[in-house]
Image: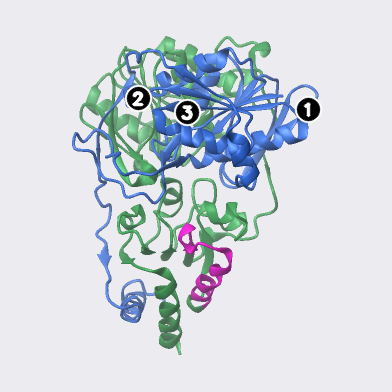
Amino acid sequence: MSGVLVVMEQRAGVLNRMSLEALAAGQQLAAKVGGGCVAAVVSEAGGLKVAGVEKVYSVEHALLKDYTSDGYVDALEQLVKKVQPSYVLFPHTYQVRDFAPALATRFMQVLISDATAIHDGPVFVRQLLQGKLNADYKQTGDGPCFVSVQAGSFRADAEAGADAAVEVFTPELNAGMIRNKPGEPFRESAQTVDLSAAPVIVSVGRGIGEESNISIVEELATALGAEMAASRPICDNGWLPMERQVGSSGQTVSPKLYLAVGISGAIQHLVGMKGSKAVIAINKDENAPIFEVADYGVVGDLFEIVPALTKAVLAAKS
Amino acid sequence: MKILVAIKQVPERDAQIRVAADGKWIDEDDLSYTINEPDAYALEEALQLKEKNGGEVVVVCAGPERVTSTLREALAKGADRAIHIEADDLGERDTLGIAQMLADAMKGEAADLILTGLQSDDLGLGQTGVVLAELLGIPHATIIMQVEKTDSGLRVKRELEDGWFQHVEMPLPALLTIQSGGNKLRYATLMGIKKAKTKETATVTASAAGAKAVSLEKVYLPEKQKKTEMLTGTPAEIATQLVEKLKFEVRVL
């Protein structure tokens, strides 16, 4: 057992950004632990190009055309047994969350999920309590160590070098052991709001307390000529439409200004907005993780500060 | 349909968190606890499925004595009975150890469906459900928004990234991890609270913790990724400073 295997994700023949970040994490880890870095891509039919690794396993089978946990777990269990890596890395996508814990269980190991950094040891850092604390995790089992990495935590390398040699790996699968029947992915309604293009976003979270209070934030957004956005709980409650949600289950944004009102900054939200050029956060809790990514922070009562800010913005514009 | 709901008790969301003296976990003195929010949605889904299709809802929670308050609340909301897996050493067990404890307590129940939240608000590993399904040898689906009983099993609506969804058909017995926001949560009624007192809570003792595959070595406050300039003063003074920043630093005014 040695080296690092990075399991990457593709859609329609294109590797997603998070997979490239996971590959960067894999290269970083391989530099620490030695043994080299190889990649694997599950697909119906290969031909994907991956650079910066020694080898790419194209895991191919007709039964892997549509994603199922059963198919992926069985196929990757066979691959891990063949490659015998010390570490198996994944991007922390919704798909990985669905199958990787079961894959680790096949080896009686536990996935270290959503890691944000890798230190010497190796020690894997992940966040606890909605980002309020960090924690160092270590593998203590003797099987391969399974780790998924958080979006945006590792920089995907643009110049990766030459394309790696591809080796086709055909797992033994039979249709009988795939228990779930997945349907075609769909969208609820055509997305009418594209927040990714908005230069200024005012975003509201749990701290607003009640639906009727949202108007004070909307007034600020109007004064700034900004798009309104929200963290998940606001959309869950139906106070703003789902299409205005920023975060891992909503949109990813990178405006010039992201003004977060009453948002504590849970990881799932931060991954959707940490690319913003400037972040202003208003929150009553000085320990709220949103302040870790904010350029300007205000600890205080949003019900006093937001109306005062709206007034000052309107005055400045007139 | 017999439904088991695995719930976890976690610190309240706005609890003041302090790192414990040994640096390995948080200081639990004076913390107030509540049901893990995604698990509250799992319970709600179970109660609604029972209302539509009949059957029984059993809540299961592992932890020290204090978790019985969370179980009682679930009973007050409408669960039929509760199983308390008594264990004071959750910190000594990893996900596999916790899932094994739940699997041991659930095996004899022969449930049609097991529900749990997609992740916990404290550890946030998001895998107990999937590992539990693997240990029990039943199919699973994660991040579920809707559940529908069909003739052959279930039809569930799974959330994917970026506003995409997918329906999945699956046989029973099965395990689902439930996403927040699919339903509106109910409150316990006075009648419910009264009734809960007559409902059964079985206590089972957890087997001794085994070796861990991963260990949490240390917890600590995160380092700031950015240098945050904190603005202070009266609301009007703060607003003036913010407008300055918007004009001259951020340049959006």
Q: Using the rendered view, name the quadrant where residue A114 is placed.
A: top left
State the hue of chain A.
green
Give me the chain letter of mark 1: B
Q: Are marks 3 and 1 in contact (CB under 8 Å)?
A: no
Query: Where the N terminus of chain A falls, by quadrant?
Result: top left
Q: Position of residue B221 (x, y in %)?
A: 25, 45
Callouts 3 and 1 on one subunit: yes
Is residue A215 covered in magenta? yes
Callouts 1 and 2 on one subunit: yes
Taking the image as shown, residue A142 lies to the left or right of residue A150, namely: left
Residue type (three-letter) at the residue carrying disc 1:
Thr
**Which disc, if any, is residue B127?**
3
Q: What stretch is highlighted in magenta?
A: A203-222
Name the element at disc 1: loop
Q: Distance between the residues labelled 3 and 1?
A: 26 Å
State the hue of chain B.
blue
Question: Mostly what secondary structure, the magenta segment?
Answer: helix
Is residue B118 covered in magenta? no
- Mark 1 or 2, closer to the camera: 2
Give me the chain letter of mark 3: B
Which sits earlier in the primary sequence, circle 1 or circle 2? 2
Q: Where is residue B37 in the image (x, y as percent from the top left)?
A: 51, 42
Q: Is residue A210 visible?
A: yes
Residue occupied by mark 2: B88
Name the element at disc 2: loop
Residue occupied by mark 1: B150
